[in-house]
Structures are given as C-alpha cells and as structure tokens.
Image: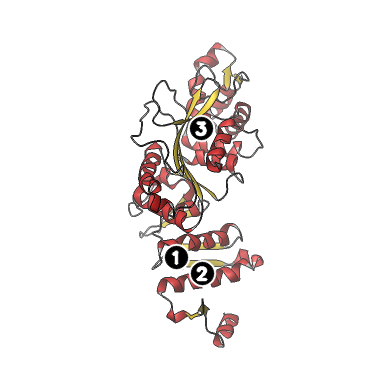
C-alpha cells in the first residue's frame, strides 16, 4: 500500500494519454484491471498470498471489451496462479472463458450455507441450483459467442456434455488454433445455439465481422430429430454434425440426412483398448464391490475398431460366462451414470492414445 501510494502521489494514472478521471466508468475498470494484471503477472512468487477481488468485471463495459477483460482475469488465476474472486457477473461469455473456475453460492440464511459448482458443467447441474441462481437464455449465450468472435478470432466446438468436452479437449488440444470447447447440457441446447447462429453467420455483412468457425456436435439419439436448416452455412463458417457409427466407421453425419441410423454417443467412438483400460481403472476406484466382482467375469473384446457401448454386437467388453452375459446390463448401467462417465473421460485423457479418423475429420473442418 505504501509503495502504491508513493508511486501515484507524484504520477497520475493515464490510459491512452487520457487522465483516469476523463475516462468512462467502463474504461476506468479496464485501466484498473490492466494495472492489476501488469503487477500480478510479473510477480509469480506472490501468487500464494495474493487475492484479486473485483465486483462485476464487465460493468458499464461494451460487450466487445468483455472478452479481454475476463481473459486477463482467467490468466491471472490459471496461468500465474493467483486467486481471483469476482462477485456477481452477468456476462454469459464467462462460461467458455473460465471453465476451470468454481461458482460459489452463499445463502442469506443463518447459519450460512455455501454451495459450489464447477463452471465446466454448469448447464448439467442447473437443476440443483439455489432458487436465486438463474441462467440467462440460450440466445444471450449465442450473443456472447458472436461478440467474442467479432472481437478476436476464435474457433468453437459446441458439444452436449462435460464428459464430451473432456474427450474433445484431449483429442484437439494444440491441433486447432484458439479453440474453445463449450458443453451446453444436451442436444436441445446445441441445436438451439446452431439455429440462433445460423442467421448472422449466413449474412455476408455480418459474416465479414466474424472471425473463426463454429462446429456444433451432437450424439445420435434413439429418436433422431432433423433440423429444417442446412447442416452448414454457405460461407462454411458454421457446421452441425451428428456422431454416427456405421459398422466399423464413425461418421460426422449431417443432420438433414435420414435413412437408417443407430444410437451413438462419444463413448461409442473411442479407441476400444484405451476405453476398456479407463473403465477398468474407474471400476476399481469407484464401483461398489458387487460391480468390481462382476467386471472380473468380462474381458476386453479386441475384434472391433471402436468402443461401441450401444452396439450389442460390437461392444468393447465380452462376458466370459453365461451368468456374466445376463449381467452385462448392470455393467453398462454403472458406466453410463453421468458422474462415472465423467470419471472415465478423465482417466482416458491421462494416457497417450492413437489418432481416430473422425477426430482428423473434425480438425479438417476447422482447417479447410
């Protein structure tokens, strides 16, 4: 405090050659975060003892400035190791910027109750939120995505769940420039975001301001709903694709295609040996004793190219006895629980695995 006071007693704070009191309130906020970033990013040794707290970082600020504002705050936390606390924010772009962060809700009751939620899967946990925590509409999220893309060139992969995001981040890390992977809690939200983005990303006047590409990726469900919109914009800047297994091939299918299809999730599209090892480790760590014992009656099925949970003829596991065959559904039911799927995805991403052709196809869409 003494150093800062002495420094500014003989200097006025300026930004772009303007005195701080001549700036708007939003510009003042940017200037102060610039200053905090300059101090803290050059002092990693202070990280363990420094807390930066800021109320509504985007207040009075044009949406085009919000991205850089939160980018600097997230870098201070995740790159430089400082503890950053923001109290109340209304900017939806926070979600893709700070997925490693935590939302803490403090009740106004006595005694105080604090509930915490990971920002990486807020959409999936929203049903358990306290009544006074509300999500804005998907339209607001879409507006934030467009705002970010107009400010800085970014590529986006919009997927259904947080386990999908773990796999996709593992496969695509460092292979697509400025990639943001955003899970939005189900097929309905993915297709809604695609519909909202389609208009502005199809118009030439709007498209010229947008930098980067967006791929919306969904599973193939039991009941396949087709979109009335085309599966990509004429400018090839926005795409929607559906994961679909066809015998020994995984296809990034267009949503407008009908015909025969089979239920497909991302867990059906992985390297089977790697997926089996991940499932085995999670079962040993997290399963009830009866599931651990039951899994001993199964072995890895090396006949097929993909993990294929939903294809009974091509599954990555094979029962070794008639009793085990009858209990296959119990193993599948356990590993398809949301929290277990998340743990399996984390285990899968710890090891080095070989490339998958459908991942190469995804990378090609971003690169072409």
Q: Is residue 322 visible?
A: yes
Report x, y in % for residue 108: 36, 60
Compared with residue 68, is residue 214 higher up or lower down, i.e. above or below? above
117 or 58, which lies in front? 58
Residue appearing at x 50%, y 25% in the figure: 245
Image spot of residue 76 (x, y percent) = 57, 62
Q: Which residue bears the numbered disc 3?
A: 266
Q: Quadrant of the N terminus?
A: bottom right
**Disc 1 residue crowd, few under 14, some 14–19, many 20+, Cα 10 Å:** many
User: For this rendering, which residue is in front, 203 or 193?
Assistant: 203
Q: Nearer the viewer, residue 98 or 342?
A: 98
- On the image, the x and y values in percent for residue 56 come to 42, 65
| Secondary structure of residue under mark 2 | helix
Left or right position of 46 against 158 = right
- Vertical arrangement, residue 225 with respect to residue 36, above or below: above
Using the rendered view, name the quadrant where residue 353 is placed. Answer: top right
Q: What residue is disc 2 on?
A: 33
Residue under pointer 1: 57
Q: Earlier in the sequence, mark 3 or mark 2?
A: 2
Query: Given the current orientation, which residue lies at the most extreme front position?
Result: 204
* Distance (Cα) linking label 3 and label 2: 40 Å
Q: Whole-Å distance between the Cαs marked 3 and 1?
A: 36 Å
Q: Are marks 1 and 2 in contact (CB under 8 Å)?
A: yes
**Sequence-wise first label, 3 or 1:** 1
Q: Is residue 68 above or below residue 23?
A: above
- Please state the total of marks drawn on the protein image: 3
Graded by Cα atoms within 10 Å as few (under 14), some (14 to 19) or many (20 or more), the crowding at tag 2 reads some
Separation of residues labelled 1 and 2 (CA atoms)? 9 Å
Q: Quadrant of the C terminus?
A: top right
């Amino acid at each position: 405090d003494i150093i800062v006071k002495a420094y500014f007693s003989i200097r006025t704070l300026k930004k772009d050659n303007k005195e701080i009191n001549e700036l708007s309130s939003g510009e003042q906020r940017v200037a102060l975060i610039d200053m905090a970033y300059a101090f803290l990013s050059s002092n990693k040794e202070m990280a363990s003892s420094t807390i930066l707290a800021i109320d509504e970082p985007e207040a009075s600020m044009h949406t085009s400035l919000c991205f850089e504002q939160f980018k600097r705050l997230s870098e201070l936390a995740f790159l430089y190791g400082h503890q950053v606390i923001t109290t109340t924010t209304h900017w939806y772009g926070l979600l893709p910027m700070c997925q490693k962060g935590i939302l803490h809700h403090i009740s106004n009751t006595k005694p105080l109750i604090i509930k915490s939620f990971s920002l990486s899967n807020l959409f999936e946990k929203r049903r358990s939120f306290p009544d006074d925590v509300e999500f804005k509409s998907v339209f607001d999220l879409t507006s934030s995505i467009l705002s970010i893309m107009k400010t800085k060139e970014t590529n986006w992969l919009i997927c259904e769940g947080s386990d999908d995001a773990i796999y996709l981040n593992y496969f695509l890390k460092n292979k697509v420039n400025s990639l943001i992977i955003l899970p939005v809690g189900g097929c309905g939200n993915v297709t809604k975001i695609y519909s909202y983005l389609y208009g502005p990303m199809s118009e030439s006047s709007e498209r010229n301001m947008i930098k980067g590409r967006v791929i919306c990726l969904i599973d193939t469900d039991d009941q396949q709903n087709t979109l009335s919109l085309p599966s990509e914009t004429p400018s090839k800047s926005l795409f929607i694709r559906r994961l679909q297994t066809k015998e020994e091939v995984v296809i990034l299918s267009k949503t407008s295609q009908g015909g025969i299809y089979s239920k497909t999730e991302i867990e059906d599209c992985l390297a089977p040996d790697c997926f089996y090892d991940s499932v085995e480790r999670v079962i040993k760590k997290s399963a009830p004793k009866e599931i651990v014992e039951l899994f001993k009656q199964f072995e890895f099925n090396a006949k097929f190219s993909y993990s294929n949970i939903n294809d009974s003829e091509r599954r990555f596991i094979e029962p070794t006895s008639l009793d085990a065959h009858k209990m296959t559904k119990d193993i599948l039911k356990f590993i398809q629980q949301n929290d277990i799927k998340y743990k399996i995805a984390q285990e899968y991403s710890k090891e080095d695995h070989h490339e998958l052709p459908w991942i190469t196809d995804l990378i090609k869409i971003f690169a072409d």
